[in-house]
Image (cartoon, helix red, strand yellow):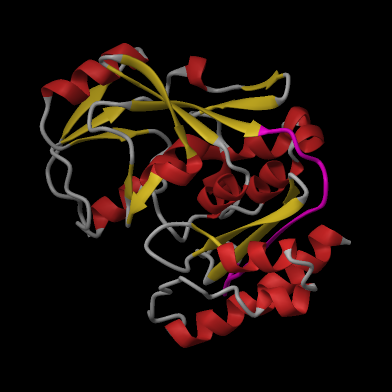
Amino acid sequence: MIPAPFEYVRAGSVDEAIAALGSRDDAKLLAGGHSLLPAMRLRVARPSTLIDIGRLTDLSYVRDDGDTIAIGALTRHHDVAGSEALQTGCPVVAHAASQIGDPQVRHMGTIGGSVAHGDPAGDMPSVLLALDASFVAKGPGGERTIEAGAFFTSLFETALAADEVLTEIKVPKTAAGWSFMKFNRRMQDWAMVGVTAIRMNGGVNVGLTNMGFTPLRAAGVEEAVAGGADPTTAARRADEGTAPPSDAFASAEYRRELVKVLTKRALEEAMA
C-alpha cells in the first residue's frame, strides 16, 4: 500500500528535531525507517510529518563508560553487533543485534528506533529490559534518564514525551552467563516468542518477547530461580502474568507453551 500524505523535514541536530516535534502535531521521528515505514504503508501509522534524524552522526557510537556501556540511539544494528566493547562487556546485546532481521535491516535499522517504536515483538526491547538498561531522552527542558522498567508503557507506546528524542542507551557490563533465544518461521520474521536470560546480581533476569502488550519480565521465573528451583521447574512459570496475542502465525495457547520451552533452554544455557 501507499502511505498517507505527509510532510518531510530533515533535522540537522537533536535540538532542531526537538523544535520540529514541538511545533507540529502528530509528527514522528524517522531514523532507519524499518519499524515506522512498514506501519505507514499499511496506514496503521499516519503521521502528518516525518522528521528525519537518520543523518545525525553524533548519535552513532558505542562507548565504554566504566561500569556501563553507552550506545548512541542512531547506532545501526550491524555496528552494535560488531562492537568489540559490547562483545566483551555485554555480549548479549551484540548477539541479539546480530539476529535482527537480515543484513539489509541490520545495516539500516537503529537500536534507538527499535526501542522507541515500542513493539513487543522486537528483539532488542526485551533484552534491554532484562538488563535493567536506562534510556537518556532529551526534550525542551533538557535531558532525563528513564529506567527500562518504566520505559515501555503500552502497545507501541513508551514513556517518551511527544517532543523528546531518545539519544542514548546505557547497559551494565555483564559477561556472566546469558542466553538469547527466539522462535520464528524465517530468519527475517518477527519472533513468535523470544526469551532472554541473564545472570545478574546473584540471580537471573528473564525478558520475554511477544508475550504481551509490552516487553515483559518473567517475574515468576526469576522468583523461582532465586528460591533454588531448577530450570525445568522455574520455566513452568514463564507465562504467568502474560497476555500473548493470537495471530496468523500462532495462537495464544501455543505461545504459552512455547515460552516455557524456550525459557527452560535459556535458563540452562545461562546457568551452565
Residue 184's spot in the image, x, y percent?
Answer: 58, 71
Residue nearest the viewer, comparing 28 with 10: 28
- 180 magenta-colored: yes
The total of numbered circles placed on residues is 0
Residue 230's spot in the image, x, y percent?
Answer: 80, 73
| Residue located 77% across and 72% down the image | 229
Residue nearest the viewer, comparing 156 with 130: 130
Q: Residue furthest front?
A: 227
Q: Which residues are magenta?
A: 172-186
Q: Residue furthest right?
A: 272
Q: From the viewer's perspective, is residue 69 above or below residue 228?
A: above
| Residue located 33% across and 34% down the image | 30
Q: Quadrant of residue 237?
A: bottom right
Residue 109 in sight: no
Residue 258's spot in the image, x, y percent?
Answer: 60, 80
Q: From the viewer's perspective, is residue 89 above or below residue 62?
A: below
Q: Quadrant of residue 267?
A: bottom right
